Amino acid sequence: MSSYPYLYTQTYSYTPFFSLVLPVLALLVIVAGGLALYFLFVRKPNIYKGSAAKLHDIFTFRTFFTEKLIRALYCIVAVAIAVYSVMLLFSHFFAALFVFVVGNLVARITFEYALLLLVLCRNTQEINRKLGPLPAEEAAPQEAAPPVPPQPPEQAPVPPQPQDNPPH
């Protein structure tokens, strides 16, 4: 008799629930939740108060929290570059200096560019808000009148021209 360790292991049978049914259910919940958020918050004007008003502003992109996220990510990246350069310091001194200086410089320029785009977007929105709606947006859309077929131009009657009769 042979004593193989795999003879006593427990085997699992294939269940289609986790690979077929569960992803379909998750997709249905995702679509239903997205539609509910759209119809509850995004389509309607902001008539809510408190937390619901903040949610409405977030889902309609009236407030941006990306700026705070970018600043936090910059801090994390700067600390990561510093820690990595300290770890690199024990094996390659000049490489550690290069990573510390150039890495922080590249990270700062990249994150400043991202913040610059956000500030540009915010300033453009503020200018649009101060200008108010354009005249074309204020007027309600009117139904277009049916096109009138072009009429031929009217010709004025030509007065009779006196004829020159030569004397006989």
Image: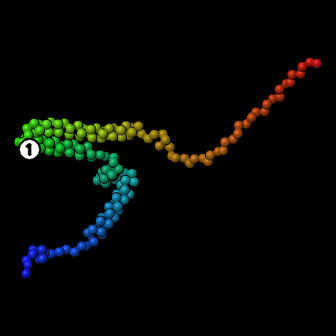
Instruction: Specify the farthest residue to the left.
Output: 90
- Please tell me which residue lies in front, 109 or 157: 109
Amino acid type at circle 1 is Met
Instruction: Specify the farthest residue to the right.
Output: 168
Q: Is residue 146 above or below residue 17?
A: above
Image location (x, y in percent) of residue 42? 37, 53
Q: Is residue 46 above or below residue 112?
A: below
Mark 1 packing: few (<14 Cα in 10 Å), some, or many (20+)?
few
Residue hosting label 1: 87
Q: Residue at x 33, y 40 (%)?
A: 121
Image location (x, y in percent) of residue 160? 83, 28
Instruction: Specify the farthest residue to the top.
Output: 167
Q: Is residue 120 above or below residue 26?
A: above
Image location (x, y in percent) of residue 162? 85, 24
Q: Residue at x 33, y 48 (%)?
A: 61
- Please tell me which residue lies in front, 92 or 113: 92
